[in-house]
Image (cartoon, rainbow, N blue to C red):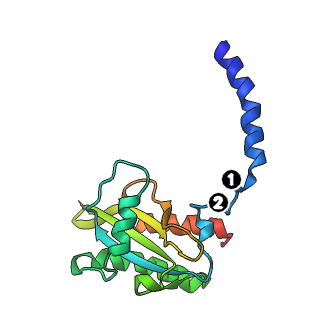
Amino acid sequence: MLVGALVLLCLPGTIAAAQDNPGENGDKRPGSLSEIRPDDRALLIVLKSTVISADDTNRAIIDLILRADPEPTARHRGVYGVLARKLNNYIRKYKSLSAASVLSDADFVIYFSLIGYRRILDVSYPFGELFVIVKGDATTNRQPHVIWKSRKVEWAADAIDDFLKDLKNNRGEL
């Protein structure tokens, strides 16, 4: 009974605080897909997962990506091809992104952290996590940060499909 009364007393204050700060819950908040502009350039990187971090800051992953070689190794070309094909189809259809070949040209990085392969019916499927990382900008004093992350470890094609679906929904593309 007492807990119910406390919840009812605190609820109006929480709702009012959320209404007073619409920028925090709007589309333009930092860490959302709205930070990707239609003319931005994306760099795709596929690396075998070597970083395990217990904190939620993703700092270790960002440091790894900013020092990584964007050229896929021979053993990861298949995974890279699956991701690149789906990204290229999106770019061709909506013409709202372009590809970068080096990190210095990219505005953001799409990073697939390959955890391993699972064999199902004699076919190997790459599994891992997908991260979208906006590069830092010294002129605006913006630090590099993760703006999107796959919800779970999943097949590479499903991870990129989830990202593109969320990006389309954010932009209103059908």
> Which corner quadrant of the image does residue 66 belong to?
bottom left
Q: Which mark is residue 29?
A: 2
| Position of residue 21 in the picture relative to residue 120 (left or right) | right
Q: Which mark is residue 25?
A: 1
Q: Residues within 10 Å of mark 2 (few under 14, many from 20)?
A: few
Q: Quadrant of the N terminus?
A: top right
Name the residue nearer the viewer: 79 or 60.
60
Q: Secondary structure at mark 2?
A: loop
Which amino acid lies under the numbered mark 1 shown in the image of this protein? Asn
Identify the residue shown where x is 64% and y is 66%: 170
Identify the residue shown where x is 25% and y is 62%: 50
The Cα–Cα distance between marks 1 and 2, rounded to whole angstroms, is: 7 Å
Q: Quadrant of the C terminus?
A: bottom right
Please determine whether, in this image, residue 14 is positioned above or below residue 128.
above
Q: Are marks 1 and 2 in contact (CB under 8 Å)?
A: yes
Q: Which mark is residue 91?
A: none
Q: Secondary structure at mark 1?
A: helix
